[in-house]
Amino acid sequence: MRITDVESIILQHDMDEPLGYSQGYYHQRTAHLVRVHTDEGLFGVGEIFGAGNVAFANQAIVHHVLTPLLIGRNPLDTNAIWHDLYNHLRDHGQKGMPIASISGIDIALWDILGKATGLPLYQLLGGKCREDYPAYGYGMMFQQRDDLEVAYSAEAQRIVELGFTALKMKIGMGIARDTSLATAVKQGAGEGIKLMADANHAYAPGEAICIGKALRDLGFYWFEEPIMPEDYQGYAMVRQALAGLQIAGGEAEWTRFGHRELLTRQCVDILQPEVSATGGISEFMKILAMAHAFGTPVLPHVWGSDVLIALDMHLLAVIPDLPGGLHQFEPMLEYDTTPNLFHSQLLREPLDILEQVKTQQGRVRPPAGPGIGIDLDPDFIDRYRVA
């Protein structure tokens, strides 16, 4: 079997209202998918991290840099191909868009491997360590309204009513406003719900510590990306100052080499590699093994279409218990509950996350089909494809 073509597909749809986070607002959803085609008719689907115009830059990397290196290769040579692509780009980009572009290709190659063998991804990666696991509802994003506390509280209540037992909110509006918003979310969610807050690296360490103390007092479970990802020393300082509040991070880190810094410098309690950015499935599994050698739980970050949701469902299934015992830390699936056509209409057969959450006490399980186990809806692709 040989690779004959690499297809880059950028999808976009307008949103009814803009949503924001600490770095800005956006008015469109973007998904950048890749399909790697072979001479035997099999193709694999992957996704590349990068919203908005970043997707078009990644598309250029796929077309002009990576595709010529892939044509004629055996798609089952996942490890060899990954290292060849990385070595080709090492002098030009050890982080960022080149690695994200490699990630999408690698994901598609693993999808081909699954289809060629008839095995689901979780089986290729060593088998399921758990049949199901919790999903957490991601919402409470910035909106352009004055009564944001009211909106956050109502949305937290709505997510709990959907069946989620954990939820995550956006912060990054300053110490006083973040504390007010977090209080509103706790009131809306009610008792017994695991709460997390994501600052998207909005703060310097001193500010992050102040906000973290407020979150800790409110009983929040983790504080995600409190400071800029380059500040390893600051991360360690924040973590040391906030014992009892889990510090999470890693979505803006790249490859095993970047995650090694987070681990050796004792930056995080929970490592959150983004598989579509940090190097794909091949690299994720290396990061997972390394993190567990440091005794650090891994909980993959996911922000993208149902391609990535399905993929992360497989990854969560194969993560071993750490350290092992009757009452374990359970990895959770991140699921965006805000309106998103790439969750509701992209696949011919939906993942039915919300139905699973409602009927299985907030828990979900991975698809069982070959590879990632998904099938894109061609009519949806045609309607929303912009490049």
Image (spheres, grey):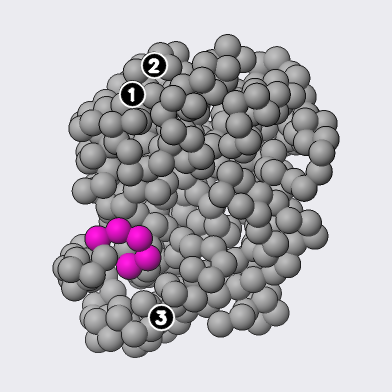
Give the Cα separation between the discs numbered 3 and 1: 39 Å
Give the residue number, with chain letter if any, for mark 1.
237
From the image, tell me which residue sits under label 3: 60
Answer with mark 3 or mark 1, whichever residue precedes in sequence: 3
Q: CA distance from mark 3 to mark 2?
A: 43 Å
Looking at numbered disc 3 in the image, what kind of residue is underneath it? Ala
Give the magenta range: 94-98
Amino acid at dot 1: Met
Question: Which residue: 81% across, 43% down?
Answer: 145
Q: Nearer the N terminus, badge 3 or badge 2?
A: 3
* Image position of 338 (left or right of 264): right
- Residue 124 drawn at (x, y percent): 32, 54
Classify residue 300 by image quadrant: top left
Residue 355: say if magenta. no
Disc 2: which residue: 241
Q: Secondary structure at mark 1?
A: helix
Q: Position of residue 165 (x, y in %)?
A: 64, 27
Contact flag, marks 1 and 2 (Cβ < 8 Å): yes
Q: Secondary structure at mark 2?
A: helix
3 or 2: mark nearer the eye: 2
Label 1 – label 2 distance at C-alpha: 6 Å
Residue 210 coordinates in the image, percent (x, y): 51, 20
Q: Residue at x 44, y 33 (%)?
A: 204
Vertical order, 2 against 304 (above or below): below
Q: What is the three-letter code of the residue carrying label 2?
A: Ala
